[in-house]
Image: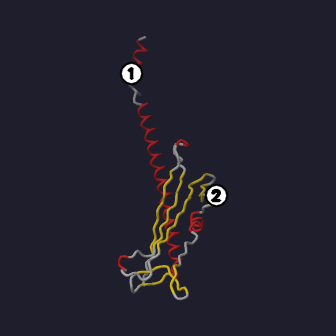
Amino acid sequence: MTKIYGIIRNKKGSSFPLIVAIALALVIIVCGISEYMRLMIIASGVRDAVQSAIISTVNDNYDDVYHGVREGYSGGYKPSSSSWSASIDYGDIYGRLDQTLGLRPESGYHVKYAGEAVEFKLSGLSVDVTNAPLAPSDPGSVQSFLADAVVQLEVPVSFGGKSLPPMRIKLKVQAKYMPLF
């Protein structure tokens, strides 16, 4: 009986469960941080690709932009008989994104796969092109040729299995046409 009592009173190895708990907590924290960084890297890459596609669309409008360089403004206009008419080309932004990011159109989404798993989905692209007015009375206060885009990004969260919902954010991007000469 005294032998069992001596084993119970012995304190050697009593911190082992605490060390295991701390190690597991650190592993969970590191996994959470790495998942957060993965989500932010994907969002940043998609935002950059959308911005590149919007800039390309604005540049595609270059051929129809009336250069009011002397007056300090420019807008998308072309001559139409005896007057000027607005001329805006919205381009194929989804096509550029599909090519740049390697997306596949599927049931209303544009999906990027990592192997067989879905890496992210894009949907709800909205592009608004603001044309500068032709010959404004005060060119200093006029907004120039501007393109705004909003797209919905959905990234499945791999941390925690299916218990966590996917990250859904709206990415907003803006591009402005500025004549250099």
**Amino acid type shown at disc 2:** Glu
Query: SS at mark 1?
Result: loop
The mark found on residue 10 in the picture is: 1
Residue 9 screen position, x and y as percent = 38, 19
Q: In this figure, which residue is indicated by the disc labeled 2?
A: 106
Q: Residue at x 47, y 55 (%)?
A: 40
Q: Quadrant of the C terminus?
A: bottom left
Residue 15 screen position, x and y as percent = 40, 30
Residue 180 screen position, x and y as percent = 42, 82
Residue 120 screen position, x and y as percent = 56, 55
Query: SS at mark 2?
Result: strand
| Residues packed near mark 1 inside 10 Å, few (<14), some (14 to 19) or many (20 plus) | few
Foreground of the two, 174 or 74: 74
For residue 69, above or below residue 97 = below
Nearest to viewer (mark 2 / mark 1): 2
Q: Residue at x 64, y 57 (%)?
A: 106
**Amino acid type shown at disc 1:** Asn
Quadrant of the image occupied by residue 103: bottom right
